[in-house]
Image: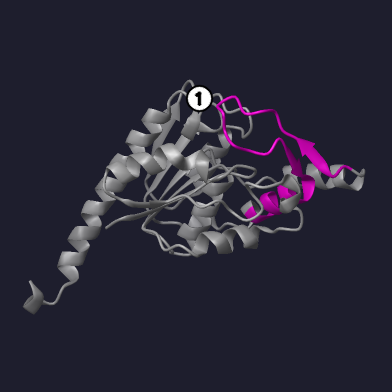
Amino acid sequence: MTRVLCLHGLGGTGATMWPIVAACIDAGFTTLAPTLPGHGTDPAELAGLTWTDWLDAAREWEADVVVGQSMGACLALQLAAEQRCRAVVCINPLAADPDAIDGLMWRKSRGQAWIEVAPSGVDEIAYERLPIDALIAMTEGVATIDVASIDLPVLLVTSVNDEVVDPASSDVIAAALNCNVRRLFLQHSGHVATLDKERHLVQRATVDFVTALSAKILSDSRDSRPMRDR
């Protein structure tokens, strides 16, 4: 059975991915949406955590497809670069941005320790403030992903009205990938597209994408069996 791992963004929880989880389970896929370290409790729990902490948590679950939102999409790309999955669905991922790192470091050097986050407009269970150190850890981690090494199938979902991540980030990632990229543009959704107005489009595209991959996995499995077992 095809295994799907769903990863939320910085400050969110596994609940951010529940609509995707529900659609994938209904389609017959084994699906999991864990809450990453430091999330779902108090934002202070994020202090001191690193990109590796979140990545190691994602590595704990073997998956055929990794679906990620925002930071989760970047973790999915890293897992793809490590050949730990067969395909990824990236929803509003961040592209590497040295200027963003410099800006965060400048704020930290001026004594700022927190970034206030606007309340969710889609009822996401999420922190409303984030430690600058956590944002730096995420941004530096994103910069280490060897996107050009990824040659697995990728579905790239972009919210045209993303208020958090510049939609152009998706274009940068699409151009860097060493594979054919399927694109889905959401005209009426913000950053947390899994919970927004067009979530049904994200659900349908994800299920269709995983279904096509599942057929290939089954075919490859049959072709790899010894002749005596056929």
In the image, is residue 103 part of the stretch drawn in magenta? no
Instruction: Name above or below for residue 107 compared with residue 217.
Output: above
Q: Which residues are magenta?
A: 112-141
Mark 1 — residue? 189
Residue at position x 92%, y 43% from top? 110
Left or right position of 97 against 184: right
Residue 53 point in image, percent of width and height? 64, 61
Residue at position x 40%, y 40% from top? 20
Left or right position of 112 against 11: right
Q: Quadrant of residue 161?
A: top right
Residue 36 point in image, percent of width and height? 58, 53
Element at badge 1? loop
Identity, as a three-letter code, of the amino acid under mark 1: Ser
Q: Quadrant of the C terminus?
A: bottom left
Q: Residue furthest top?
A: 188
In the image, is residue 133 part of the stretch drawn in magenta? yes
170 or 163, which lies in front?
Answer: 163
Q: Residue furthest right?
A: 110
Residue at position x 59%, y 46% from top? 71
48 or 217, which lies in front?
Answer: 48
Residue 99 point in image, percent of width and height? 74, 43
